[in-house]
Amino acid sequence: MDCPEQETIEHYISGQLEASKLAEFEVHLETCGHCKTKLAKARENENLLSELRFLGTTTSSGGDSVTTQRVHIGTVERAQELLGSKYRVIRMVGHGGAGEVFQTIDPILDRQVAIKFLTRKDTAEKISKQRWQEARLLGQLNHPNVAQVYGIGESEGGVRYIVMEWVEGLLLTDAWREMGLQQRLGLYLQVLDGISAAHRRGIIHRDIKPSNILVTAANKAKVLDFGIAVDEQPLMSADEGRYRGTPAFSAPEQISAPVKVSPATDVFALGILLYDLLTDTLPFDETDPAELFDSIKHKHPELPSAIQEKIPIALQNICLKALEKNPHRRYRTARDLLDDINRYLRGEKVWSRPSFLLDKVQQEVFYHRQKLKVWHDNELITQREYDKLENIYERMISPDDPSIIEARKLSFSQVCLYLGGWVAVLGSFVLFYKTWDQIPIYWRPAPAIAATVLMVVFGLAMWRRKESRLSVGFLATANLLIPITILLTLGQWEILSANDFSWGKETIYNLLKGAGSHVIVGNMQLYYSSWCWLAFSLLFLRLTKSSIFVLFSIIAFLIWLTTCYVIGGMEEWKPDIIAGRYLFPGIGMFVLGTVLDRRKYTQYAWPPGAAGLTMIVITLSVIALSDQTLFGWIYRKPEFLKDYEHHLLSFMCNGVIYLGLAGVCRLLGTRFQRALAQVLSWLGPLHFLAVLRILDSDKLDLPHLHRMFYRFLLPVASLAFVFGSVVRQMKSFFFSGLIGIAAAVHKFTVEHLDKFFAWPVSLIITGIIWMLVSWLVPRWKASVALKRQQ
Amino acid sequence: MEWVTTTQVLEELQSSNDAPAWQRLCGHFHTVVVNFAKHMGLSVPDAEDAAQETMLAFVKAFRDGKYNRDKGHLGDWLFGIAKHVILNVRKRQPLEQLMADKTTGTSFWDMIQDDHNIKLSWETEWRHMVLAKCFEQARREFDPKVFKAFELYALTQTAVDKVAQQLEMSRNAVYIAKCRVLSRLRELDGQFE
């Protein structure tokens, strides 16, 4: 990169350099001493410039200093003279850079009002139509947390004034001195509410600080003084050249050229207010103006948790996001800030993160990518390697929506949410187990339909409320319920079932029947339901961008494809596979993959390695399930073992084989081997639960008490797997647990409860309640935690 | 007004007893004290009186050799004197005349006069005086067109294209004008005290 122009340096200093150019410029700086010196000099100049602007040393034009006139009201008598009989002036209550304020009485309406004279004559004269328009907008702003503007006027002498609501109360900082965190947050939320109402009307306050917020006796916060909002120049007053706004509450863009004030400017001041709320100190408290401006523009504030240990990290992150130097990285408006705090108060995850760490990563990535390009140009790496690494870097600097990442994370509440959804899905699936002749035909699929509609409605409502984590949970459940509900409805109502059996010879129906189904499912029904499932999966994927819907889409597509094959006549299923034909080639391919990997041909190792492993796993499972069993297949079935004991031992042996293979793969330690080990590690917990399920088989002929023990152990162990997965994010245990629960529900249904319509209904209701509880409990916990902190 | 540093003022005050030395001193510090006194709540006539009193007290102490430059900044020393004088004036006045009610009503302005705010107010006034002097000196030194470019672009924040067009300069010349004037201002700032 060539040395950047001066303009780039200036934009960099003012924090207005586009993100795309930022990293490039910083990398250049690391290697260019000339630019470093230029930057240092420009920074020092910029600090001095900020001071000049702040102090308004000059407002001269054409070489001659202009002394700006100031209309000085000064006394109650003078104010009364200007206002005539319209108002009765009581006393002067304050004066500042923009005007003088008097407490007055409106004799017609018999109410107290505050009148602010715009005493800077140049300002009063230059106030443009647009600004008066803003003043009018303020007049329309009727919000309980904003001191209302009743009107604007001009005295006979040409002095303009604003008539405002009179507010009695304490300064915000004085009011919250004795308060706990929750009470303080309550007041702060009121302030946010008031400011966000102004933002909605396009009004920016520009001078938010504790002394502009009063708390009334009724504990209501009132934001005062939108005075600067109606002035022509927000920063530099021509009169006495004073900076307007409050230095310690100024945003970087307010003190840098070119000034671009937006609602995010108010957000910065609100961030400082929040910092004060949390720590009782200001983030930038230098007394020297130049140092203060330098800190505001370039330094990150000390972490609030370093000042007050008990500060919740979520609030800290919210505060730091509001204090981002770049306005584009802050909350756009007070409303967004308010939403995030409300999210925290509801006990939900807050997504705000300070960006400076991400910036660091982006810088490094940019540097690496430049190197990578050089390697590629010099043919040190292949096109494929280059593309792969580029993809990885691309993903790193444009990470997923954090809420989606959180939905993937196995937190306790998220696990509860998914578990509830899974139970509701299982409940709906149990409706397949009987034809439920005692229930009127149109009511039979009703519980599943109701659950699906409820999940869709909840999911979309959550999405609209930007609660993505919960939304993904509800929509994922809805997505699983959709094909089940469609199949169930079509099956129970006998739609598309009469004519299509001949097409596929009931093949897929037979598979479902094997799982205990009594509701007749036709292949055409399956065809349409999988088609709908695919459509909804893609719809939800587009909406949420969560990868779980990619998985659902693939499954739906595979089922749809299989159904097409079956309908097309390619339906023959060959369960009697001869194990030897698959096991040895599988082992051979697996070994071939490993050898290729060891000889550094990793890219060629993947196809045989993955295919070999798949063949081994499928064949071993089929052997364990078939009459042959592993022992019979290797040598001969030991006579003293019954059939199911063979199955049991076969599964146990398979588990041991997979564990051994995973150990070997980890030992070899290449990326390829580690990936295989990860796949194998998924099979361990699944086999453990499968063994428990087999132990409860009729054919094992175990004593009744033992069987009951295993019957209860299976769901208990499955739940332990599901909740245990939270500890180390063990997704293999989580999914195995879900399958274990499904197996347990199946067993209970078949053994005890297949005649009771109430059983699937209660499962569905339990699932929904569980989901709602997992949504509400974190809110309750957060509120308890807040109370404790007080 | 010619460019005179604080050191020159003090040296002149030390060596001569004439009117120009006194005028120079007042030219430097009088406005600072008046503005500070007004900020502390004094009326304009009272602030003028307080400034006069401060100057006299300052000269007397200085000639008595009470000011040691190694021990502190001149501004800090003058602040001590001014604060003392102004507080004395304030003590003679009823509080209601000085400050508006802070805790009730639409009290828009920070009128809370704690030590930190008082000091901040003084430092702001002092810095304002220093920068104003540097600024006037820089204006005298530079070509009016260059200085105008600096004022328009850097201070009034007019868009660079507009400035270039208005003054018939290139964009780069505008940037350079800003850089040159600011660099000179920094030099003058360093020289002043």
Image (cartoon, helix red, strand yellow):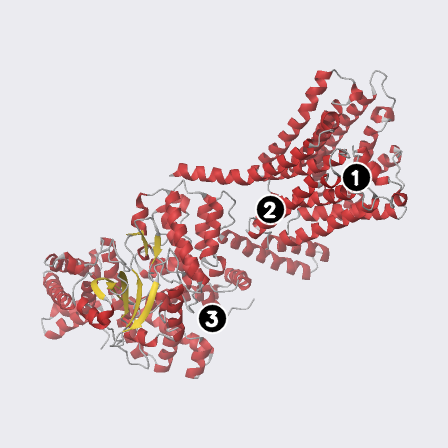
Q: Residue A232: x percent and y percent? A: 36, 72
- In the displayed structure, does residue A380 sit left or right of residue A20? right
Number of the label disc, if any, that sits on residue A6: 3
Number of the label disc, if any, that sits on residue A614: 1
Q: Nearer the viewer, mark 1 or mark 2?
A: 2
Badge 3 density bin: few <14, some 14–19, many ≥20, Cα 10 Å: some
Q: Amino acid at mark 1?
A: Thr
Disc on the earlier residue, 1 or 2? 2
Q: Residue A741: x percent and y percent? A: 68, 31
Q: Chain of mark 1?
A: A
Q: Chain of mark 2?
A: A
Q: Amino acid at mark 3?
A: Gln
| Residue depicted at 89% across the width and 37% down the height | A574
Number of the label disc, if any, that sits on residue A458: 2
Quarter assignment of residue A519: top right
Which structural element holds mark 3? Answer: helix
